[in-house]
Image (cartoon, grey):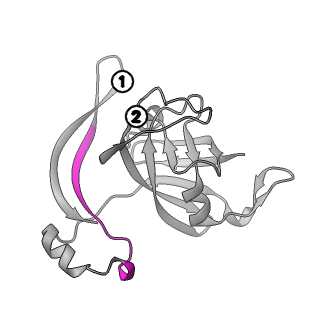
Amino acid sequence: MRISVLFESAHATAEREVLIDSRATDNFICKNLLQQLQIAYLPLETPLRIWNIDGTHNQDGRITHFMDLQVRMGTNTKLLRFLLTNLGKDEVILGYPWLTAFEPMIHWKDTTLDKAHQPVIINPKEVQVSSVIMEEEWEIENEDLEEVPYLAIWNVRTHALEPMEGGGVASSELGSARVTL
């Protein structure tokens, strides 16, 4: 099923038709769309191997980058992870994580999203770092992970999209820091 989604960034706005796929284990986005909207991305700690629906390996090889994007459906807003990879003719795939986060009402007869879940808007969320703690301190504070809400320590590497000759965009690493998100 395909739906219309509005992408907003500080640099551009674009409306796109995106694929909803309940078999997709994650949410995915292509590099071209990120470059058009000038949305930065971060490296994965461990690259992921990915297979296409037909069982072949994705032509981009392993997934090495991600971004967390703010997704709004109607009045409900959530922060969701999107993995960066080649999607062929698609620019975005909303997978099982999106479906479980929003539990959208879909009218299958005419393949439309219920009006209560519209509009669907995706934009980058600026991460505000309020404090930095050492990994050992975090482990002591969060020994029982079952009781802790979503919390992670990342080695964050900031990437900036820089204009190239000919109108393209390249990513460059600006620096790194250990932060608590």
Location of mark 2 (residue): 35
Marks 1 and 2 close (CB-CB < 8 Å): yes
| Residue 132 is at least partly visible in this image | no
Q: Position of residue 48 (x, y in %)?
A: 39, 43
Residue drawn 45% across the image and 36% down it: 85
Q: Which of 114 and 37 is in front in this view?
A: 114
Q: Is residue 13 magenta?
A: no
Residue 131 is marked as: none
- Please give the range of residues in magenta: 146-160
Q: Which residue is drawn at 58% across and 51% down?
A: 95
* Closer-to-camera residue (145/15): 145
Q: Which residue lies furthest to the top in this view?
A: 166
The amino acid pointed to by label 2 is: Gln
Q: Which amino acid does label 1 sit on?
A: Gly
Q: Position of residue 181 (x, y in %)?
A: 29, 66
x%, y% of residue 49? 42, 39
Identify the residue under disc 1.
Answer: 168
Which residue sits at x=18%, y=71%? 131
From what the image shows, is residue 122 above or below residue 35?
Answer: below
